[in-house]
Image (cartoon, grey):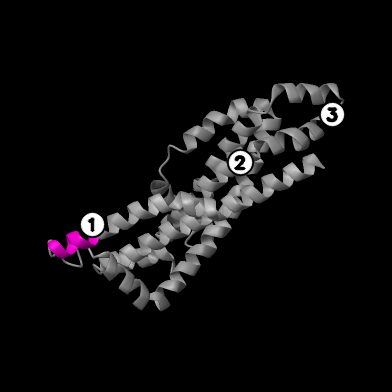
Amino acid sequence: MKQLAAASWRPMSVLLLLFIAWETSVRLFHIETWLLPSPIAVIKEAYSSWGSFSVHLLATIRLSILGFGIGTIFGLFIAIILHLMPFLRKSFYPLLILSQNIPIIVLAPLLVIWFGFGILPKIIVIILVCFFPITIACLDGFRQTSAELKHYMIMSGSNKRQLFWKLEWPHALPSIFSGLKISATYSVMGAVISEWLGSKEGVGVYMTLSSSSFRTDRVFVAIFAIMLLSLLFFLIIQLLEKLCIKGYRKKESS
């Protein structure tokens, strides 16, 4: 906790200075609220509209968690299959790279045409955003496993299953969690983009309605909520990383 406080005071100080400069500029140049609201105006709007905004926020949180969970399972499954079957990795790895060159905002309307306006196209959008960092990080973790330890276990009579679960998987955990932290923040962005496809609630819907009515202060409320939610997801994955890696180390030492 002390390390977290010591590491966070510098970025918090910079952020505070930016808010002060923002507030001062708005007041000094008399910028209209519809063009650029001050931080205090945004905070006031967040407080006054919390009752209606919280419904949209909870909808985005549910969608993000669901999409991130499915995307994580999908990404890990692909990584494990490609790792255990090298001939598939040589065939499909370039296709994974190419899949990320398709803009999600362009693909989203096609998903609506194919799957309708339900939850399925929204989940697919989040999965497409989330699975790639997890798959690539997981494959990199498997590839960086110590060749000497692998050779030693093979010489000791370990089969492929033991080699994977006792050496390659634990060794890849730091890389996997790095991918999870990236994907956790992407899941919020993916959820907001998917909500633009025709949802009835969500932060994406709230942003669309606010921008169309020139309520810029509400748009900033949504932006700050997305940033805080992404940061919260990142910190949760970071905490899980410490617990899991510590657990594996205790298990190995015992």
Question: Compared to 228, does 242 lie above or below?
Answer: above
Residue 80 place in picture, x, y as percent: 68, 37
The three-letter amino acid code for the residue at tag 1 is Ala
Residue nearer the viewer, 168 or 254: 254
Residue closest to the far right: 157
Q: Which residue is mark 3?
A: 158
Secondary structure, mark 1, is helix
- Where are the magenta residues, as a range? 22-28
* Of labels 1 and 3, the one closer to you: 1
How many marks the image carries: the answer is 3
**Magenta stretch: dominant SS?**
helix
Secondary structure, mark 3, is loop
Q: Which residue is mark 2?
A: 176
- Tell me the residue at 40%/43% (across/down): 103
- Tell me the residue at 46%/53% (across/down): 190
Question: Compared to 204, does 3 lie above or below?
Answer: above
